Amino acid sequence: MKKTSGDIDWRHLDASHHLHPFTDNKALRLTGVRVIEKAEGVYLWDGDGNRYLDGFAGLWCVNVGYGRKELIEAAAAQMQQLPYYNLFFKTTTMPAIELAQAICELTPPGLNQVFFTGSGSEANDTVFRMVRRYWDLRGQKKKKVFIARKNAYHGSTVAGASLGGMRYMHEQGDLPIPGIEHIEQPYAFELAGDLSSEAFGRLAAGWLEQKILELGPEHVAAFIGEPIQGAGGVIIPPLNYWSEVEKICRKYDVLICADEVICGFGRLGHWFGCQHFGFTPDFMSIAKGLSSGYLPIGGVVVRDEVAELLVEQGGEFNHGFTYSGHPVCAAVALANLRILREERIVETVRKQSGPYLSRKLAELVDHPLVGEVRNIGLIGAIELVADKHTRKRCGKLGDTGSLCRDMALREGLILRATGDTMLLSPPLIISGAEIDELVAKTRLALDATAAQLGL
Ligand code: PMP
């Protein structure tokens, strides 16, 4: 790689001192790391001068795209004015107040209180503690168990990873912690068989009811789920799934926690994923698109009745973070929400770019490797299979996905793979021509993958 700044060998330095997240660091040190140097719009450049279309918006987060001057200026101005102060000890800051208000203008009716965190994981840890506190205050001290789903992702902290349903995470560090149960995910491609979407939605929601009855409703505190599972493989549930889940939760007095860390702030063509699926949660975890990833910030939005009990009867809630509502992050998030609103980006995803991506992805269905394409708004997936009809995968699960991801990189496209499912989540400002480029490059990557597999 070209030495990009003076005489620094970035790869060597990285290998010498840097432990990467979710990475086999030994393998990475052997192959060498990709150094991303700059970005603009939907494009990234590495240190060797290669350009990539970012089909993944960083990590599902750069909703307004790269290089937005308004966000940079908002950060600089807030740095000058007040670079840091905390929200403890009867204190607040203006950006935190303004941001809480701005978020509550966008949330569904009845969700009007925000607790700030530094990340999505911290948001879910906060939900975990708030839910248990809530039932304690209600005098229902046995109501402690969370029901979550296999293959869900709710973060990497101990509670986040425990709520998540990733077996490979649980295997490291004796997780999940007690009091968390996982049910099957609403993964139609693998589990629906010949059922209609509606029938599968009822069946999958029924797994929740079964689990509540098995545990006893008096023990079940909450159900947590991503409206669309992201890292698990963009698992889009049937349209009736969440309303069925909502009915079940209300029937047994179980709180509903929507992890909106990916779905929030426009990805599905609505401000929040729950609005697409038509349900009202008691808690929403938010992060990522809140600041378009420019600075780390997250939070929990709490439904009025729940917040009122916590406020009126809870006394001091012994929980919080040094960077809860960090003023610079909050100022950037505010500028980000302004861009999303003023440029009508969420509406564009719903009415134009989302439906256009659906039409373009449908063109890939004829490819011999493709078993299914699916998307809502600007989040989507392509299932890779050896046989379209039986949906049999090609060899060891994950090998084809990794190969296809590498082939996409060669074409100048960043895609992510979960198992043999290719995931798409481009910046929400992606244009029609850029969607054309994304899908054309995906087809080239599929062709190259099929050629390597000898298909
Ligand atoms: N929830 C979901 C649905 C996520 O996708 C993620 C991050 N990928 C998290 C929580 C955790 O967020 P963070 O990495 O900011 O802690």
Image: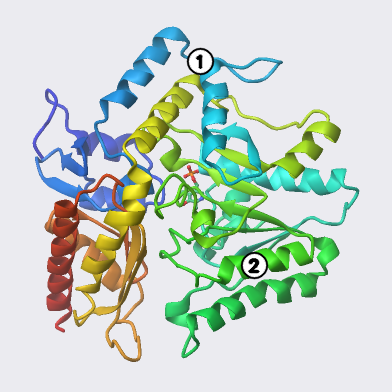
Residue at the spot 45% in from the left edge and 21% down from the top edge: 328
Kindly identify the amino acid type of the residue bearing the numbered disc 2.
Val
Q: Which residue is mark 2?
A: 245
Q: Which mark is residue 84?
A: 1
Q: Which image quadrant: the N terminus?
A: top left
- Residue 185: where, in percent of width, then height? 54, 71
Residue 119 lies, in percent from the top left, at: 51, 38
Locate residue 364, reporting x and y percent: 21, 73
Left or right position of 128 against 445: right
Res. 109 in view: yes
Label 2 Cα neighbours within 10 Å, binned few <14 / some 14-19 / many ≥20: many
At mark 1, the secondary structure is loop
Q: How many marks?
A: 2
Name which residue type carries label 1. Tyr
Asked if residue 342 is positioned above or below residue 405 in the image, the reply reads above
Question: In what quadrant of the picture does the C terminus appear?
Answer: bottom left
In the picture, measured across the screen, residue 234 lies left or right of residue 226, that is left
Q: Are marks 1 and 2 in contact (CB under 8 Å)?
A: no
Other residues around mark 1 within 10 Å, as few (<14) / some (14–19) / many (≥20): some
Q: Earlier in the sequence, mark 1 or mark 2?
A: 1
Residue at (83% x, 34% y) in the render: 314
